[in-house]
Amino acid sequence: MRVFVLPPWMLWWMAFLPPLAGLGAATLIRRAHARTGELQPWIEAIVVGLTLVPLAVVVAWPALLLPARAALAAGLSVALLAHDPRDLPQTEVALKIMWVLSAAFALSWAGDALLAMASGSARAREQWPALALALDPYALWTAALSLSMMAGLVLLGGAPFHFWPGDLFHGARAHVAPFVAATLQLAGAAWLLRHLDGISAFNDAAMLVRSLLTLAAATALAGGAATLGYQTRPERRVGALVSLQGGLVLASLAAAPSREPFADHGGLALWAGHLLLASTGATLLSRFLPAAAGAEERASVLFRRHPWTGVAGGYALLSLAGAPGTPGMYLWLDVARTLADHRRPGLLFGVTLAWLAAFGVAAFEIRRAFGAPDGTPAPGRAVPRSLRAAMWMACGSLLVLLYVWQGRRAG
Amino acid sequence: MALPQLRVPPNYAGAASATLGVALLMLPGLAWAALGLELVALAFWLWARSLPDRAEQLARWGWLRRPPMALWLAAALFLALPELKLVFAPVPAGPAAGPIAAPTFIPAPLPMTRDPMLLLRTLASLAVLWAGLELMAALPLSRPFPDLTGPARPVGPWLTAILPVTGFLVLWRQAAVWTAAPLVKEIAALALMLAVVLAALRAFSRRSLTATLRWLVVYDSAMASLLVARDVVRGEIAALLWLGAAGGRLIALAAELRGQHVRRGAKLTRYWRFAGWVAGASLAWPLLADAGFSGHEFHVVEYFVLAAPVLLTNALWLNRVVEAPERRAMARREDRAPRMSRLGATATLLAGPASLAWAWRQGLHVSPIAGAAALLPQLLAWWPVRRLIPAPDPSGVVRENVAGGPRDFALSTFRAVTVIERQLAAAIAGVARALGAPARDLHSGDAQEYLLFLVGVAVLALLLPLLR
């Protein structure tokens, strides 16, 4: 069978599709959530969309994210969350994230400073050959290396730091949360990658990093899988699924610390793009889901009034969980492949466990969303058109991503 | 302008979904099988949510998502790691000794070795086996489902019987995945033998013919899966033998729900009785011969463990299929000339012997002693054992309920096994919950605690390198 494969230049441009679609979706969502006093809701929405452009640029071009810029991107995300004092839940989320990120960056910068002192250089690539000379005490450089990774671990949001994605998707508004989550997690991945650049030059450090990342990935995957089952609110379930994406990055880095994760699927740019699109659709869907209804209760408004839009949102949720037939599946398979290639069966088992939990919970959530028909007529008031358009935009972009990755795999 | 909405009744949507699902199970790929099972689960969900007692029905059939999940897991493993397909493939040990001699092969390694690929391949095999066994009521968590009526009202009693059918289709079509792994076949054989025994006991202990027939479909599917697991005959032949036996019961069950079409008239009833017995005997005969007499030795345990349920189910079929009383003033046209029913009986009658003839042509060899011994329980079922089983009344329901009688024993045995299994499963779940509870209580959502977490992890990160 002949498979159409996209030319390389088009694949390069593909990195821009998710952020652009994300920006469009964010503008549409903001338009739907216009406050009663707003005179020009579309203009307000476009202005808010423009404030997200720096985050979209980061998602499209993660090569920009040097460690200092990663910290700046994190700061910008917190500022975006905190800018509206009237929005108390979102401000609380901003405070919580700032609280923990400040401490994490402080610890990591202390580690960086110690490493620079021990090796005589602030550049990661130059540090490892210097440390390999074994002129410094073991305790010094190991402590410095462990501390320098802290910010990356916190930013990736894997358990035990999975509280911030949960809080973010629960408390922040639907157009901001996916951008902030994608930016922070991307910053975490970039932070770790930059710090581990050239680490293969010092075998002891590479082994230590592998051990630490393996522990972190195992905790993130097992903790994330366990948390999924305990979450009571649909928004927090989306947050737990997002935290599992951080676990995937950790698992990939644990297998190959100096290789960019998801390199076979467009690297971190497309991973973050997928995360942005899938979490946009999923978080929108989660806001229509009942918090405590059983599977036998009637469907939520969205599913009774616009079931196909509900299906589009469900597709995004399934993609976030890596369900078969979605682009998210390729990311999970990519990590499984990497782990198998580097002979890490324990972590592969963890990925398997987390995937089963994620897929199972997402499928259950969608069944709960459809509920059971009770014969009552559909509600008269429609879900705003712009919200539905945002869901379709996320779903359509995910399908394009699926097509591209499928073609790439076949090619 | 409001567009008219297309609303498909849930009954039709479920039927289409289930039909497509079963059709997909016939395809060889694991992903197709997973999709097929997902569609069958979807059909049950669609049916269950449309009923007045939807809360109970949805809870009752919720477990149906587990088998497709197991198959998705196996499919994902093969998709991520295509080389898994080669893990248990036979490896030639060297060139053949001569032009006629077959080359020797190195036996497959055991999964206990440290190669992760072996473990993953075994995991994939176990996942497929789990899916098949659970659908055949051969695992503790789903054991009692054939006792229940399905969630679609008109065909509910029949609907449950398609689940063992899907289980067998999974095990048959995906046999290459699970039979290649060492130990998995043995696990499968043990679970299936237990399922055969329990299904026979439960079929015997149920009073109504419809419930008995559902359990007989489970029994047939488990027997046919044993043929596949033990590699007695080729998969296609096992499937044909199963089609004759289980297909006959499924037709009888459907007919029972539509005017007892297989039991209208003495001749037709006798014909069905004989056809079902031939189909059941054809299915059990090669299995009994192989289990009892493989390797030119008599395996007492295997033979008697299988012979007992074979004897019981054959006697049960012969005893329970009795002529239905005619209470209607005017018989339907189908009852006067029951062409469809006769056609079904003829197909049931011919499928078994035809499959055995095909197996014979393919090289199935059974020694005369093994053949005779394998036929013995089936012949005994005609007489005198059949007389020992309480006879049903003309409506097909057994009225006898003597305490301490054979029915009582069968019922108690089945219940004891299922209770033990459930308590074991509940104990394991309880331990898991107890272990998970502290983790659940760990996070209160307080911002102070986030910082404590960070400090804790930082201290751990400092200590771990020193402890290495």
Image: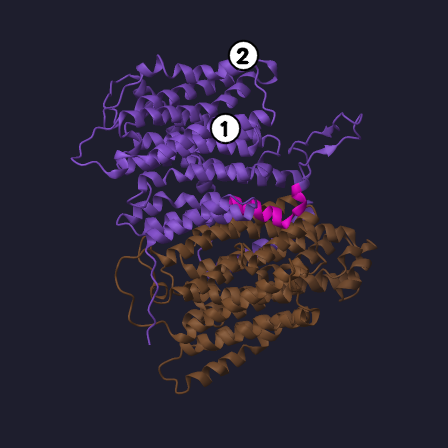
- In the displayed structure, B342 sits above or below A51; it is above
Residue A94, image x, y percentages: 49, 70
- Give the number of the disc on residue B171: none
Check chain identity for marks 2 and 1: say if they share one.
yes
Q: Main secondary structure of the magenta part?
A: helix
Q: What stretch is highlighted in magenta?
A: B70-85
Query: Which residue is most to the front?
Result: B337
Does the magenta run of residues contain B78?
yes
Q: In this view, does A324 lie to the left or right of A170?
A: right
To which residue does mark 1 refer?
B354
Residue B186, image x, y percentages: 56, 28
The chain letter for the residue carrying disc 2 is B
**How many residues crowd around disc 2 within 10 Å: few (fewer than 14), some, or many (20 or more)?**
few
The residue drawn where x is 57% and y is 62% is A402
The residue drawn where x is 42% and y is 87% is A40
Q: Chain A colour?
A: brown
- Residue B448 visible to an observer of this rendering: no
To which residue does mark 2 refer?
B369
The chain letter for the residue carrying disc 1 is B
Here the colouring is by chain
Quadrant in which the C terminus of chain B appears: top right
- Amino acid type indicated by mark 2: Ile
